[in-house]
Amino acid sequence: MAALQATAAQHRPEWGMMMPPCPHAVSKIASLALVTYTYNDHDLVDDLLSSVRCWSVRPKEIIVVDDGSRCRFTDKNQLQALTILRHDRNRGPTLAKAAGIRAVTSKFFLSVDADVRLPPQWAEACLPHVAEREIGMVSSRVRHETGSPAMDTYLDGLYAPKQEVGLVRFIPGPVFAMRKDTYDLVGGFAGHAAPRGEDTYLCQQLLRHGLRLYKMDGVEACQQRKLTLVQCMKRCVSWDLPYFEKRSAKGDSLVDTLPAFFMKCRQRMAFLPPDDAVVRYIGILFLVSGSLTIAGLNPAEPEGTALRLAKFCRLLLAIPPYPWGPCEGHRQNRPHLTGDGRRRVLFCRH
């Protein structure tokens, strides 16, 4: 297929011969494929591939999907058994993952986003679980390192709660391991046309086939992409957007979709530190950004959109336990002053 060009790497020296020595002894190679993806972020992939030399279990094959980057991805680590697949244009995470996993020839595969880093023992700890026939997918907690402690706390609280281990109902897409025959059995991403939401779809397919999703305890991955606050909000909204796009396509109005989104926001606030004003402020930004994005899915309802948003925001803030709402002084329209007499309007600590 012209749109997808495959380049098999030539035979090269064994891993480690052309790299600095690793403090961890590496002696085992498993029937495991590492599949990763890049779109104009080749440095992240290079760093990921470089880190593989320290894993206690090495993958038998490595597949990199270049999803239409401006500059072609080339191997700088001189790794053995590397295959590079390239899309002629950006197709999005769903098709990038489908292409990479389809090329797997090993018994197991490990799908890892370019910005995710795994501790040396992660793959070795994962394989015994993924080998169990009743387990369809295995992962672990993925903590975040965005460059902002507040955004790290926000993302960890929402998407990486420490208490969520063992059998779960959903595993996010940044890193997961599966048996290749299990992926083929459930049809992979074949029934999912949207560019995002592929992780939700695959998890649902596994559950429909009676398979279990398992999150390991004792090891965790780390997502290290540096983000601005605007980039963080766009990413968070994009993860939830496929659900609301489907509802909009079915003809659901804002009166139906916005309350569902607001309730999701309220539930998520319970996972955030109650006394961290900055982190909870990020929660407010997510509410506003998501609401406006969802409203934009309904171009036939321009009139009254702002009023609906304002009404639902007032309803949300008026429901106890006031996750980010006004304190008693605000409800009585009393001014709030700091110690130097300046008016304070955003956060109250009464």
Image (cartoon, rainbow, N blue to C red):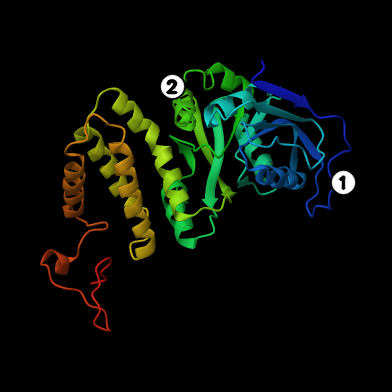
Residue 345 visible in rendering:
yes
- Front: mark 2 or 1: 1
Q: Is residue 221 left or right of residue 199?
A: right
Q: Is residue 77 left or right of residue 229?
A: right
- Residue, disc 1: 18
Seen in the picture, residue 103 relative to 269 is either above or below; the reply is: above
Question: Looking at the figure, which quarter contains the C terminus?
Answer: bottom left
- Residue, disc 2: 208
Mark 1, residues whose alpha carbon is within 10 Å: few (<14), some, or many (≥20)?
few
Question: Disc count in the image?
Answer: 2
> Of 21 and 338, which appears nearest the observer?
338
Q: Place residue 234 in its image quadrant.
A: top left
Q: Position of residue 246 (x, y in %)?
A: 34, 26
Extreme residue in the bottom direction: 340
Q: Position of residue 317 (x, y in %)?
A: 20, 54
Seen in the picture, residue 171 relative to 4 is either above or below; the reply is: below
Q: Secondary structure at mark 1?
A: loop
Q: Secondary structure at mark 2?
A: helix
Q: Are marks 2 and 1 in contact (CB under 8 Å)?
A: no
Seen in the picture, residue 182 relative to 305 is either above or below; the reply is: above
Q: Is residue 126 left or right of residue 61?
A: left
Q: Position of residue 123 (x, y in %)?
A: 67, 40
Going by the numbered disc 1, the residue's amino acid type is Met
Q: Which is more N-terminal, label 1 or label 2?
A: 1
Mark 2, residues whose alpha carbon is within 10 Å: few (<14), some, or many (≥20)?
few
Question: Looking at the figure, which quarter contains the N terminus?
Answer: top right
Residue 132 visible in rendering:
no
